[in-house]
Image (cartoon, rainbow, N blue to C red):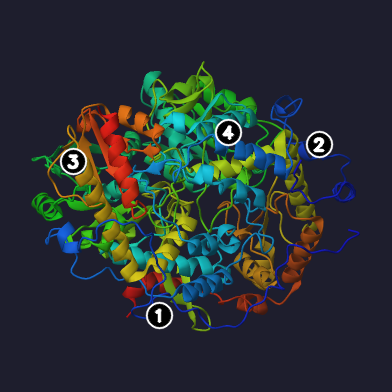
Amino acid sequence: MASRAPGGKATSAPIMGRDSEPTIFELSSPGRRAASFRTTGIPEWSPEELVSPEHLRDEPAPVAELSERDLVAHFTRLSHRQYSVDLGAYPLGSCTMKYNPKLCDDAAALPGLTDVHPAAPANLTQGWLELLADLEQVLCRITGMQAATLQPPAGAAGELTGLLLMRAWHGDHGGRRHKVVIPDSAHGTNPASVTLGGYDTVTVPSDDRGLVDVAALRERLDDDVAGIMLTNPNTLGLFEEDIAEIAAAVHDVGGLLYYDGANLNAILGVTRPGDMGFDIVHMNLHKTFAVPHGGGGPGAGPVAVSERLAPYLPGPRPVLGDDGTYRWEQPAKSIGRVHSWHGNALALARAHSYILANGGDGLRRVAEAAVLNANWLRTRLRGIYDLPYDRPAMHEFVASTSTLKKSKDLRALDVAKRLLEEGFHSPTVYFPLIVDEALMIEPTETESPQTLEALGDALERIASGDDEEARQAPRSTPVRRVDEARAARQLVPTWDARE
Amino acid sequence: MAHYVPHTDAEIAEMLTFLGMSSLDELFATVPEALRLAGGLDVAPGLSEPDTLAVMEGLADRNRRAGRELVCFAGGGAYDHEVPATVRRVAFRSEFVTAYTPYQPEVAQGVLQALFEYQTLICRLTGMEVANASLYDGASACVEAVNLATAATGREKVLVSKGVNPNWRQVMRTYAAGTGHQFVDCDVIDGRTRWAEGEEPAALLVQYPNYLGCIEDLAAARRVADANGALLLVAFDPVAAGLLRSPGAFGADVVVGEGQPFGTPLSFGGPYLGLFACMREHVRRLPGRLVGETVDADGRRAYVTTLRTREQDIRREKASSNVCTNQTLIAVACAVQLAWLGTSGLRELALRCARGTRYTREALLGIDGVEPLNGAPVFREFAVATPVPGETIVERMAEDGFLAGIPLGDEYGDRGLLISVTERRTRDEVDSFAAAFEKVIR
């Protein structure tokens, strides 16, 4: 590249020292506090006048006692012990750690969105209903489906919602079925959701292309199969080329096709799950549509369906009436609520603003750049790492240290830890389960070519470097490798559980 | 339009050359021609940043905001509490906001330690020994509590108080279609749950204080649980921890709840925070993530997600929960707000809610035609029976600038209203509220 601007590398981040940060409980000093309250003029009854003795606490619940200054310093120091997308590249496969536009933060912080009670009547919340109805519609257009629910608060919740839709539909069309097919490369949430949906998991193997083995799938299909859950592109980053054949085979036995939207970002504007024959689609708005991951959440997992499943969707849903106003409506055969209120509304608002800003043209550009970046890096690493499925990938690819493990005992975990020293977050390791010593790499579209070069250089240095050094890594991070076995063996889940 | 793809055209051309390709379309060669979307997405072209914000502001303007425009007396699991500047400025630092799940603990000590502190705080409030790193909301926490109890006892039936938030019970019913769990709804008589007999339940689920605001008799619930060999599951309002004895003090096995009151604005219902805590004997069945303390290679204190073998990515179809993404950021905000309140601030918050509730309740019960729905003691919320339907009162009072409460469904009598009073409500607001209330029920 002409320019050398390794934007995604974080080795310049300043660190003041190597001490542990004390907990808020250690920083407590009796009598200190930050809180202050509004002047209300309400009579100041005593606790004894308000609560009967059998329910009144003897002692206040111990929290922590800090000045505002000390607690701000504490959490700021904690933030400095945390890697983030805003700090540098985060090529975690399947997690889609792309940059989250700041405008979405501002959009979701508008007081007209944040200061609205979820039980306020529809005539007072027309803006929210319109936003949600618009988002349902645009998500349907992106996925090629007919109707959607925005209630599921995460991808796994979307999966379970989809399975309950499947169950309700079969209940009305020929009765109970017992099995759901998933590929051996599927995310762990798929089989866990299948169990909670009341189904038995049937696993279908991948073939030597890394795709669903269609012959093996046919052997597993019968009239007790409720459906199949597929991620496309799959977790190896490969497009399931036989999807039309798979769809026909599943539909032939009366089954439904469920699309796990974890990798939807790869195909935006290129193809749509609806066109592939899927009946139910969940989307991870925190992956594809740039809702930040928040250290583990909140996300949002809307589910879109084809016409025949629309009456079963969770409700209530926002509907535009003939009079031009929005109201809540329960779908005719709704499976019921899947969230306390209307889903993770502010996360939905963020995604809505992201889609508005990108538009149909921009979303296609997202997919193109994501796939371009993944294939560039895959090609860059050829001959350095094993590429067990070395064919054109979509938004991510899977490399392996299988050969390096034999030649110099360099494992995927060591590569992950060494990469931290190089100023990058690690890829996903040891997933999918069907690849030995897997490194699942998803650069995302928001990393520049220069960042990719720096990442490729770092990965090459690690592969050619000293394996003993790699096993010592990381050395420059706030802590070094942690003793996970001890954490499980001598469980200390709270400050008060310490000896 | 706004764009977040950094590549220049020249760079794209150079990268394609490196791949031996001549166009971006070639990247999608593995997508069968018949499936390709002709003509692009039917989605409007992208907007610039200011134009996008203008659209979002337009939507926001079509909502009536809680605050001076609409003084909020509605609760029911979503409360109009103060969110201090410290929470907004600190919990929403981009290091916390833009991090992933802490899979690499060496570079995730910030989120991990904040969660460890959060877990400790939730245990102190609930009187439990272990708390997870959060679930989605109050409803999902109830679902997971039922899943834990049925797995622990090998029984399928759960006694559920009708005093549990009706939306949460609806979610429980939705998910029970998959798990096959059965619920026995138990009536609320004069504000307190009357437990069904002869059912051999896995557990009892009770809300404390309940949906109608009443302080349930947890000691009695514990006795029923013991007599049946069942677990006691308590859905707890964490604000009540400032004044009321904790569910743990009454012998609860699992405590769940909605954590929104600490650090999260009303937000039209989400993202909120599912609280989940239990006694240590149940830790192997704890849903979601758990952070534990350990040491690093140099023996220094460190934190890591632990007991990972419970989780879906390892146990797959044998996992008892499918939770992966949770509400970590909201849990961090909760920890910051609790630290800001401190021990005395939490007590004062609860006290102020209770005082406002008593003042408002007395003002409304002084109005001719307004009757208490029951005689049980309340804490921060109360229900009244009114001569006109609750929906009518809410509709009319909006014209006077109040969100009057939540109309009670048929389950609780058809002419009732649930009213909540937080520490934000002033005497003037309550007096005007009562005056308007008197006018609209005539």
Q: Position of residue A234 (x, y in %)?
A: 62, 42
| Residue A200 image point, x, y percent | 40, 38
Whole-number angstrom distance, CA of label 3 to CA of label 4:
44 Å
Residue found at x 74% / y 33%: B45
Q: Nearer the viewer, mark 1 or mark 3?
A: 3
Q: Tell me the amino acid under the disc marked 1.
A: Glu
The 10 Å Cα crowd at callout 2, few under 14, some 14 to 19, many 20 or more, is few
Q: Please identify the quarter of the rendering in which residue B126 is found.
A: bottom left
Q: In the rendered structure, find residue B290 and report the number of the disc placed on it.
A: none
Check disc 2 and report its element: helix, strand or loop.
Answer: helix
Callout 4: 10 Å neighbours few (<14), some, many (20+)? many
| Total number of numbered discs in the rendering | 4
Label 3 sits on residue: B365
Is mark 3 in CB contact (under 8 Å) with mark 2? no
User: Is any atom of residue A300 visible in this view?
Assistant: no
Pointer 4 and pointer 2 on the same chain = no
> Could you tell me residue A231's position as x and y percent?
58, 39
The residue carrying mark 1 is: A26
Q: Amino acid at mark 2?
A: Asp
Q: Is residue B270 above or below residue A120?
A: below
Badge 3 sits on which subunit? B
- Confirm whether circles 3 and 2 share one chain: yes
Looking at the image, tell me whether mark 3 or mark 2 is earlier in sequence order. Answer: 2
Q: Which residue is mark 2?
A: B25
> In the rendered structure, are the residues bearing label 4 and label 1 in contact, judged by CB atoms less than 8 Å apart?
no
Asked whether B323 or A318 is in front, the reply is A318
Q: Which residue is mark 4?
A: A135
C-alpha span from label 3 to label 2 = 71 Å
Q: Label 4 vs label 2: CA separation?
A: 28 Å
